[in-house]
Image (cartoon, rainbow, N blue to C red):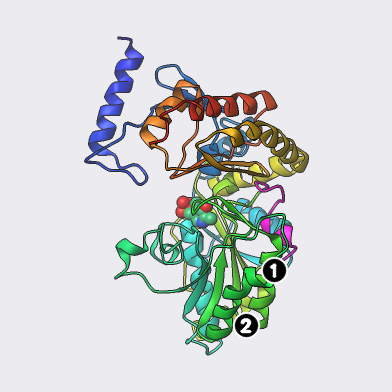
């Protein structure tokens, strides 16, 4: 036994003894793979195995790992200061980031609130919407309207607007606030939104708009709730209905932001501006946790002119300089890189590579949008087993339920992407994978 494998098994054992993983059991743990380093699109396991990463570490690492420019930004900043409080103090990295975000997001989003993680940015967005209406003397506007099939995070307000069936509602039913849900948008990305596609959404808004503070949705791509792509025309009509009924629109672009869908922000597909927007995940290129909630002047003025006189929120690590510096480097890298042509290249390779999957008996559907490729199986996959098989193929892909999908780093080459898809194909085309 080499020193490395010994260390790996010891780490692995202690991991199971002490460590929670996302959505994991400690009484029936599934062993986790030990990663010792990562570079470009590759994850390096403790036993020497190299894996092509198809997940961008949950959709964050858009420039791949160990990127020279992002490394330099972090090192440079750490020698100045890692963190200072944001109450009464400001610094260049945060100011530059907020100015850039205002500049590149849809028009009208002029104010930025920084926070620690995607879920917190959703909490902030929801609080903004409620506080805005309270300030306007409309404290009866205390409900939200969300879409089935959505996902907005794991904290309580975020949980309460996740899909009511595949989310956590049934477990936390007694402690979650109750909100309204419209059907999951079924109208495909390439289709026009007919009256029947939006009728139920409109009816809920028409009947209940006096209680509804905001509509919250993921524009164009519903991610963790089921990898559903829907029509920009639907989103356009949602925007119009919100305006008509005096309801704010919150766009959760935590997964879709920064180019993933083929536009810099998915709202651009519908040419709309929300009143509030959440950003996270790839904001720092996957280097560290940071999120942002943007809003219009109308929302920020409405809140600050109200009784409280300020927005009632302020996380300890707000505006962390290290995270802001890396975010600035990540956005520079993205915008300087002809990102749109690059995403088009990934989309076109994915479309070619995904075709053979349509002929497999166990596959129900395949779809591609931007740098997102989805293979929907007929039955849920056995995660532990399929994970092992993917690792044997030298690829890192982590499905959920029936969904085997890739969201690779944008730096992935066509050859690496082909190898990734070939690896998935050899696993899914082997019998008995699906249980
Ligand atoms: C991941 C995600 C979140 C939650 O972000 P965290 O950083 O995990 O808290 C919220 N909304 C969407 C759309 C996401 O994809």
- The residue identified by callout 2 is 246
Please, which residue is most extreme toward the top here? 1
Q: Position of residue 241 (x, y in %)?
A: 66, 77
The residue at 73%/36% (across/down) is 348
The residue at 58%/25% (across/down) is 422
Check residue 434 for magenta coloring: no
Determine the image quadrant of residue 334: top right
In the image: residue 227, left or right of residue 402: right
Q: Give the label, 1 or 2, closer to the camera.
A: 1
Does the numbered disc 1 mark a residue whose Cβ is under 8 Å from ligand 1? no
Q: Main secondary structure of the magenta part?
A: loop
Q: In this view of the protein, can residue 84 be seen by the observer?
A: no
Distance of label 1 from label 2 (alpha carbons): 23 Å
State the count of labels: 2
Judging from the image, what secondary structure is the residue with disc 2 in? loop
Query: 218 or 435: which is nearer to us?
Result: 435
Q: Is 132 above or below relative to 269?
A: below
Judging from the image, what secondary structure is the residue with disc 1 in? loop
Q: Position of residue 267 (x, y in %)?
A: 68, 60
Look at the image and tell me in which quarter the N terminus lies.
top left
Q: Which residues are magenta?
A: 259-272
Q: Position of residue 73 (x, y in %)?
A: 61, 38
Disc number at residue 287? none
- The residue identified by callout 1 is 194
């Amino acid at each position: 036994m080499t020193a490395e494998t010994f260390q790996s098994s010891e780490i692995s054992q202690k991991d199971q003894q002490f460590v929670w993983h996302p959505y994991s059991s400690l009484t029936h743990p599934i062993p986790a793979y030990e990663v010792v380093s990562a570079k470009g699109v590759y994850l390096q396991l403790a036993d020497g195995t190299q894996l092509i990463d198809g997940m961008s570490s949950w959709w964050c690492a858009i420039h791949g790992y160990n990127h020279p420019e992002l490394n330099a930004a972090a090192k440079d900043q750490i020698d100045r200061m890692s963190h200072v409080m944001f109450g009464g103090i400001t610094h260049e990295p945060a100011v530059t980031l907020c100015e850039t975000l205002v500049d590149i997001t849809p028009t009208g989003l002029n104010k930025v609130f920084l926070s620690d993680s995607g879920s917190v940015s959703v909490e902030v967005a929801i609080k903004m919407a409620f506080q805005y209406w309270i300030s306007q003397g409309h404290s009866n506007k205390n409900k939200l309207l969300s879409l089935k099939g959505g996902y907005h995070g794991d904290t309580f307000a975020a949980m309460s607007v996740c899909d009511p069936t595949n989310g956590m509602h049934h477990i936390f039913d007694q402690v979650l606030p109750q909100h309204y849900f419209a059907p999951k948008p079924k109208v495909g990305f390439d289709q026009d939104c007919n009256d029947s596609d939006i009728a139920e959404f409109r009816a809920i808004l028409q009947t209940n708009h006096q209680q509804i503070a905001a509509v919250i949705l993921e524009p164009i791509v519903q991610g963790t709730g089921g990898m559903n792509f829907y029509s920009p025309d639907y989103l356009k009509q949602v925007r119009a209905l919100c305006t008509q009924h005096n309801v704010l629109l919150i766009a959760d672009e935590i997964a879709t932001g920064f180019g993933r869908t083929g536009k810099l922000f998915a709202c651009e597909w519908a040419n709309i501006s929300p009143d509030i927007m959440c950003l996270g995940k790839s904001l720092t290129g996957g280097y560290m946790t940071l999120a942002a909630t943007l809003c219009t002047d109308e929302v920020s003025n409405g809140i600050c002119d109200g009784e409280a006189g300020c927005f009632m929120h302020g996380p300890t690590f707000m505006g962390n300089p290290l995270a802001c510096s890396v975010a600035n480097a990540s956005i520079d890298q993205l915008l300087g890189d002809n990102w749109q042509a690059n995403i088009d290249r990934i989309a076109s390779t994915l479309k070619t590579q995904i075709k053979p999957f349509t002929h497999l008996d166990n596959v129900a559907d395949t779809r591609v949008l931007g740098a997102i490729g989805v293979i929907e199986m007929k039955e849920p996959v056995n995660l532990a087993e399929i994970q092992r098989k993917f690792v044997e193929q030298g690829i890192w892909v982590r499905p959920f339920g029936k969904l085997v999908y890739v969201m690779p780093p944008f730096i992935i080459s066509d050859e690496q992407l082909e190898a990734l898809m070939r690896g998935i194909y050899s696993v899914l085309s082997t019998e008995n994978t699906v249980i």
